[in-house]
Image (cartoon, rainbow, N blue to C red):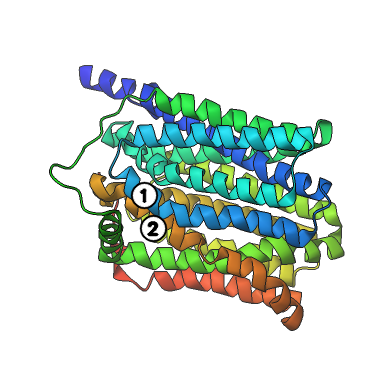
Amino acid sequence: MRDDSARAERGSPLRHRNFRLLVTGAATSSLGNAIAPVALAFAVLDLGGSASELGLVVAAYALADVVTALFGGVLGDRVARQLLMEGSNAACAVSQAAVAVLVIGGWASVPILAVLGAVNGALGALSGPSSSAMTRMTVPSDLLGSAVALRGLLQTSAAVVGYALGGVLVAGTSPGWAIGVDALTFAVAAVCFGRLDVPHTRHEGTRPSLTSDMAEGLREVLRHTWLWLLIGQALLYHLFYGGAQAVVGPIVMGDEFGRSSWGLALGVLMAGFVVGGLVCLRWRPSRMLSIGTVLLSLTAAFPLAMALSDHLWPILVGAFLHGLGLQIFDVFWQLAIQENITEDKLARVYSFDLVGSFIARPIGLAATGPVAEAVGFDRWLVVVGCVMGGSALLSLLSPDVRRLRRRS
């Protein structure tokens, strides 16, 4: 009876104070990060900026984010992660507040927004690997699977709300005030992270240089075939799908079904994310990585449906399957990393995951337009779908991916 009572006490990750603080801070940041691109886009356009200038502003943020993530991983394994997360979010709150003041006061310019966007991207990237690595320090080991799934669900749900809220704020007030709300979310996250009470294991003796630490993290990634192989698959996914969503999708859907259909499709895709998160709250199979990789191949359904269907409903089904499969894979992927990487290298591994996954996305965004125009939009979407689905299924040829089991 006492054992049953103890299990009931620990039955939900939300019963643990540190996890509540962590997930509240992470979800609040996701809310703000969804508001920011909507507000920033209209801030640039209101200044008379062109589509190319908007692309440069977004690219500056993305480049700074990718480059700094590696150093964020090294620092996350060197210093107290809680302190790094608190300081990073507090600094982001200040930088975004400065952007808001400049936009509201009429003193902003496109170059200033690009520079401050890069600063904000760099500051935010410092805490990303630490935040991901922190999950298993906030719950008992037997609740790690539930914690990873619940965190993913809450962050995704917050992002859905954030995209909608960003549009409402921009329409009802101005881009500057919407950016101000984003600054407030960073401040809330900093407070939540500052209240965490978790241990930090420090290495004894003299620490190696930052580059040596980074090299050690890379060796840890290369030591696990399943890890570097699926990071490579993620690189292909973002290289091809980033441009398909940002460039080709809106054009194809807008011409065929009207502009509102594209917003509907993205909304259904996000609904797939939410349902996938709910599924993972209960379902964690033993061979989670191989099953997750099979479901990841469902992401091909969205671009293939856009290319091949003359009706809207198959496209919406494809969008839902895309979100569902990607979210379930991501939860199982996060859990695999949490269970198989040692604590002293966890933040660095997460940083290589982030960089390896997203480093090619800017190339895809820049190249998709010219390539798709040359070969035809529908043909290019077929190529994108085949690469996305095929690369996921090809990953299953590796025994390391197929055989990796969840730890009990």
Tell me if residue 356 comes above or below residue 21 in the rendering: below
Q: CA distance from mark 2 to mark 1?
A: 8 Å
* Rendering coords of residue 41 (x, y %): 74, 48
395 relative position to 108: left or right = left
Q: Secondary structure at mark 1?
A: helix
Task: Bin the neighbour count of mark 2 within 10 Å (Cα to Cα): few under 14, some 14-19, many 20 and up.
Answer: many
Q: Position of residue 320 (x, y in %)?
A: 64, 53
Residue drawn where x is 47% and y is 47% of the image: 125
Residue 336 can be seen, yes or no: no
Q: Which residue occupies the extreme bottom position in the image?
A: 375
Q: Is residue 319 above or below residue 42?
A: below
The residue where tag 1 is placed is 73
377 w.r.t. 131: above or below: below
> Around disc 1, counting alpha carbons within 10 Å, would you say few (fewer than 14), some (14 to 19), or many (20 or more)?
many
User: In the picture, residue 254 is in which quadrant?
Assistant: bottom right
Q: Residue furthest left?
A: 205
Depth check: give the residue in front, 324 or 176. 176
- Are circles 2 and 1 on residues that touch, CB within 8 Å? yes
Residue depicted at 68% across the width and 61% down the height: 245
Amino acid of disc 1: Gly
Local secondary structure at mark 2:
helix
Can you say which quadrant of the picture contains the C terminus? top left
- Residue under the point 64% across and 35% down: 98
Mark found first going from the N terminus, 2 or 1: 1
Q: Amino acid at mark 2?
A: Phe
Residue at 46 percent across and 67 percent down: it is 233
Residue identified by numbered label 2: 352
Left-right relation of 208 to 286: left
* x and y, in percent, of residue 244 in the image: 67, 66
Side of 204 where 48 appears, left or right? right
